[in-house]
Image (cartoon, helix red, strand yellow):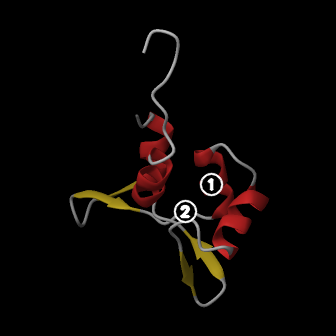
Amino acid sequence: MRSEDDSDLACDVSRSVGGCAEVPIDVKAAAKFLGVSPSLVYAYVERKQIPHYRMMGRAIRFRLSELAEWRQQFHVNGGINE
């Protein structure tokens, strides 16, 4: 489930386009979204375990929608009553 903070990161309301376009986020924002440290995000990138792309060869960026899908694969339905 996405919170308002997630949608703020994911959307850049562009009046010229008239809709919500996804804005690429950096390592720090991705780490916050995933609830892990930036160093762990860098480790995932180095091992090619997380969806990412590079801008201008060095800057690592992520699409929030891809991170949400990637994070969902680790979701465990569990608990006492389930």
Q: Is residue 35 left or right of residue 68?
A: right
Q: Which mark is residue 60?
A: none
Mark 2 Cα shell of 10 Å, populated few (<14), some (14-19), many (≥20) = some
Which secondary structure lies at badge 1?
A: helix
**20, above or below 42, in the image:** above
Mark 1 Cα shell of 10 Å, populated few (<14), some (14-19), many (≥20) = some
User: Residue 66 in the image: x percent, y percent?
Assistant: 42, 60
Q: Residue furthest top?
A: 81
Residue at image location 66% in from the left, 63% down from the top? 27
Residue that carries the numbered disc 1 in the rendered image: 29
Mark 2 → mark 1, Cα distance in angstroms: 6 Å
* Kind of residue sitting beneath label 1: Ala
Kindly indicate whether the residue at mark 1 contacts the one at mark 2 (C-beta within 8 angstroms).
yes
- Tally of numbered discs: 2
User: Residue 1 in the image: x percent, y percent?
Assistant: 40, 34
Q: Residue furthest left?
A: 18
Residue at image location 69% in from the left, 75% down from the top? 46
Which secondary structure lies at badge 2?
A: loop
User: Residue 3 in the image: x percent, y percent?
Assistant: 45, 34
- The C terminus lies in quadrant: top left
Quarter of the image for residue 21 reads bottom left
Which residue is at the front of the view, 3 or 66?
A: 66
Residue at image location 48% in from the left, 38% down from the top? 75
User: Residue 56 in the image: x percent, y percent?
Assistant: 58, 89
Residue that carries the numbered disc 2 in the rendered image: 25
Q: Residue furthest right?
A: 39
**41, above or below 45, in the image:** above
Q: Is residue 13 left or right of residue 48?
A: left
Residue at image location 74% in from the left, 58% down from the top? 40
Which residue is at the front of the view, 42 or 21?
A: 42
* Kind of residue sitting beneath label 2: Ile
